């Protein structure tokens, strides 16, 4: 019996599909996963906007940053101090390119 290695699983998966399907429900397609992320945005963005109301210089920690879905929303709502954590080198490297003002670290929070 082999043991499950989450880092290898996610590294392989994101290297092959660094998109909504890669971080979502694999096999259900990009269109379905894109729709699911639109639903998440519609629910999460107003909630986050209310939580940030009146907060001076908010900061955020995003655990499992993946493709940066929540990073994008945080930045759009004015959060400038963002730290993202991800298990994979693939995600961290791509997130650093896409969001140069945020800090991204590779780490296993379960370790």
Image (tube, rainbow, N blue to C red):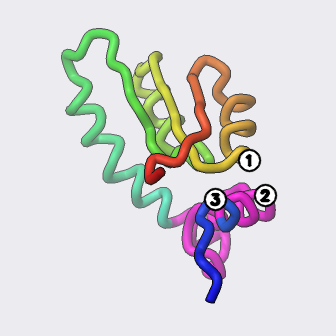
Q: Residue 81: horizontal and vertical position, in percent?
A: 45, 17
Q: Is mark 3 on a helix, strand or loop?
A: helix
> What mark, if any, has residue 90 been given in the picture?
1
Of circles 1 and 3, the one toward us is 3
Residue under label 2, please give it: 15
Residue pictured at 59% horizontal, 30% vertical: 104
Picture quadrant of residue 7: bottom right
Q: Distance between the residues labelled 1 and 3?
A: 11 Å
Upstream in sequence: badge 1 or badge 3: 3
Question: Where are the magenta residues, as a range?
Answer: 10-35
Upstream in sequence: badge 2 or badge 1: 2
> What mark, if any, has residue 70 been given in the picture?
none
Residue under label 3, please give it: 7
Mark 3 nearby-residue class (10 Å; few <14, some 14–19, many ≥20): some
Mark 1 nearby-residue class (10 Å; few <14, some 14–19, many ≥20): some
Residue pictured at 47% horizontal, 42% vertical: 70
Horizontal side, residue 68 vs residue 44: left or right:
right
Up/down of 64 relative to 19, above or below: above
CB atoms of marks 2 and 1 within 8 Å = yes
Of residues 46 and 69, which is closer to you in this image? 69
Of residues 58 and 39, which is closer to you in this image? 58
Of residues 48 and 8, which is closer to you in this image? 8
- Does 15 appear in magenta? yes
């Amino acid at each position: 019996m082999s043991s499950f290695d989450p880092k290898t699983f996610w590294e392989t998966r994101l290297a092959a599909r660094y998109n909504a399907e890669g971080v979502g429900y694999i096999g259900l397609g990009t269109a379905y996963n894109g729709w699911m992320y639109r639903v998440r945005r519609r629910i999460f963005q107003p909630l986050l906007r209310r939580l940030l109301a009146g907060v001076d210089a908010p900061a955020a920690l995003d655990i499992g940053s993946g493709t940066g879905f929540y990073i994008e929303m945080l930045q759009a709502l004015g959060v400038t101090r963002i730290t993202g954590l991800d298990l994979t080198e693939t995600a961290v490297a791509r997130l650093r390119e896409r969001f140069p003002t945020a800090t991204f670290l590779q780490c296993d929070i379960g370790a």
